[in-house]
Image (cartoon, rainbow, N blue to C red):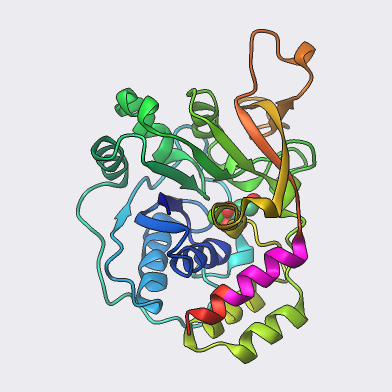
C-alpha cells in the first residue's frame, strides 16, 4: 500500500477523504493526519480530525496540529459550505482522544526522514504545513516520492474567486513553494473535482446500506451538498486506490501570489513555448470516470459499518 500523510482542514470532504483512506487498507496506509487552518480555524479543523478518527475507531492513527494561519495571506474568509463547526453541524460527538504534542510540521519532517522514499504527502487543505516543512528541512525534498494534492484550477475558473480555488487562495505562497520544490506532483484541482458531483440518490443508497460511520458521512454530505456538491478531497485518495479512474496532462503549474484580482490563481503551461526552461512539474488530473468513482466510494463507506 501507499504510505501517506493526510494534511487537511476538515471540512466535510476532507472527512470523507480520511474515511475513504481508512476503508482501503490494501491500497493506503495512513501514517499520520496533520491539520491546518482552512475551511474553519485550526482549533476546529484539529478537533474535526479527531472526531473523524474517533468515529471510525482509529485511535491508532496519530493526529498532529499544524499552522493556525497562512504564511502571508490575510485570514479574510472562511468557508461556509462546511457549516459552523466544519463538519456540517450534524452533532458529531466531541473528540474523546487527543492530538500528539509534536507540531505537524515537525511530524512531517520526522516521518519522511525516518522513511526515505516511502511517504506520499496528500495535502487536501491550504499547503502551509507542507511549505514550512520543505523550508525548515530541505533535506526531505529528495526523500518524498510524490505529493498528490487537492488544490488549484488549472484550466477552469476558481471557486473562491473567479481566478482561484479555495486551498490556493487561502495560502498562495505555500502552494507556490510546494509546486516549485522539485517533487513529483499530481494535482487534483477543480478541473477534475468539479466533476465529482454528489447526487441525492447516491446519498440515499449509501445511507440505507451503511452502519453508523457511513450514515454520519452521508449526514455531513447532505449538509454540505447545497453550497458545493463536489467531492474534492476524496479524489486524492481514490487515485491511490485506483488510478485508472482518472486521466490527466503534464504541465508546468505555478500560483499567482500578489495580483489583487488573481491571487491564488493557478497558471498551467502545457505548450513548451509557454514554459521556456521548465519541464512539467505536475501531472494535472483533468478527467474522471464518475460512475466508477461513486461506486468505489459507496462500497468503501458502507464497508466501514
Ligand atoms: C477545497 O476547499 C475546501 O472547501 C475543500 O475541503 C477542498 O479541499 C475545494 O476548493
Ligand atoms: Ca479540504
Q: Return the residue found at the far left.
A: 101
Where the N terminus falls, by quadrant? bottom left
Q: Is residue 295 magenta?
A: yes
Q: Position of residue 197 (x, y in %)?
A: 75, 64
Q: Can residue 220 be seen in this view?
A: no
Ligand 2, by image quadrant, is bottom right
Judge from the rendering whether residue 104 lies leftward or rightward of residue 77; answer left or right: left
Query: What segment is highlighted magenta in the picture?
Result: 290-299
Q: Can you say whether 138 is above or below 80 in the image?
A: above
Observer-nearest residue: 96 or 54? Answer: 54
Residue 265 sits in quarter: top right
Q: Does the magenta stretch include residue 194?
A: no
For the point 48% across and 32% down, which residue is it?
72
Q: Where is residue 132 in the image (x, y as percent from the top left)?
A: 37, 33
Observer-nearest residue: 6 or 83? Answer: 6
Q: Return the residue found at the far top.
A: 277
Observer-nearest residue: 167 or 238? Answer: 238
Q: Position of residue 253 (x, y in %)?
A: 65, 27
For the point 55% across and 29% down, which residue is it?
179
Dominant SS in magenta: helix
Q: Position of residue 221 (x, y in %)?
A: 63, 74
Residue 69 sits in quarter: top left
For the point 62% across and 40% down, which residue is it?
187
Observer-nearest residue: 197 or 260? Answer: 197
Residue 237 sits in quarter: bottom right
Judge from the rendering whether residue 91 lies leftward or rightward of residue 166; answer left or right: left
Judge from the rendering whether residue 95 lies leftward or rightward of residue 160; answer left or right: left
Q: Can you say whether 24 is above or below 31 in the image?
A: below
Q: Can you say whether 104 is above or below 97 in the image?
A: above
Amino acid at each position: 500500500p501507499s504510505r501517506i500523510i493526510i494534511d487537511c482542514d476538515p471540512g466535510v470532504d476532507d472527512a470523507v477523504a480520511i474515511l475513504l483512506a481508512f476503508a482501503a487498507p490494501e491500497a493506503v496506509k495512513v501514517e499520520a493526519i496533520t491539520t491546518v487552518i482552512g475551511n474553519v480555524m485550526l482549533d476546529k479543523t484539529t478537533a474535526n480530525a479527531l472526531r473523524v478518527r474517533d468515529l471510525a475507531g482509529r485511535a491508532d492513527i496519530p493526529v498532529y496540529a499544524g499552522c493556525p494561519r497562512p504564511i502571508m495571506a490575510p485570514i479574510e474568509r472562511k468557508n461556509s459550505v462546511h457549516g459552523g463547526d466544519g463538519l456540517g453541524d450534524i452533532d458529531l460527538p466531541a473528540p474523546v482522544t487527543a492530538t500528539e504534542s509534536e507540531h505537524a510540521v515537525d511530524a512531517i519532517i520526522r516521518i519522511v526522514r525516518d522513511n526515505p522514499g516511502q511517504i506520499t504527502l496528500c495535502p487536501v487543505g491550504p499547503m502551509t504545513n507542507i511549505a514550512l516543512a520543505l523550508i525548515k528541512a530541505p533535506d526531505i525534498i529528495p526523500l518524498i516520492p510524490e505529493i498528490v494534492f487537492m488544490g488549484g484550477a488549472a484550466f477552469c475558473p476558481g471557486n473562491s474567486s473567479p481566478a482561484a480555488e479555495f486551498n490556493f487562495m487561502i495560502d498562495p505562497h505555500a502552494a507556490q513553494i510546494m509546486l516549485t520544490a522539485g517533487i513529483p506532483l499530481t494535482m487534483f484541482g477543480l478541473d477534475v473535482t468539479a466533476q465529482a458531483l454528489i447526487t441525492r440518490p447516491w446519498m440515499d443508497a449509501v445511507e440505507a446500506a451503511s452502519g453508523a460511520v457511513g450514515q454520519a458521512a452521508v449526514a455531513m454530505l447532505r449538509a454540505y451538498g447545497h453550497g458545493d456538491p463536489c467531492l474534492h478531497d476524496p479524489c486524492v485518495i481514490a487515485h491511490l486506490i485506483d488510478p485508472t479512474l482518472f486521466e490527466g496532462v503534464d504541465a508546468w503549474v505555478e500560483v499567482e501570489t500578489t495580483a489583487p484580482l488573481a491571487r491564488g490563481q493557478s497558471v498551467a503551461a502545457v505548450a513548451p513555448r509557454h514554459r521556456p526552461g521548465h519541464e512539467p512539474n505536475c501531472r494535472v488530473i483533468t478527467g474522471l470516470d464518475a460512475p466508477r468513482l461513486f461506486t468505489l466510494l459507496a462500497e468503501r463507506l458502507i464497508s466501514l459499518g
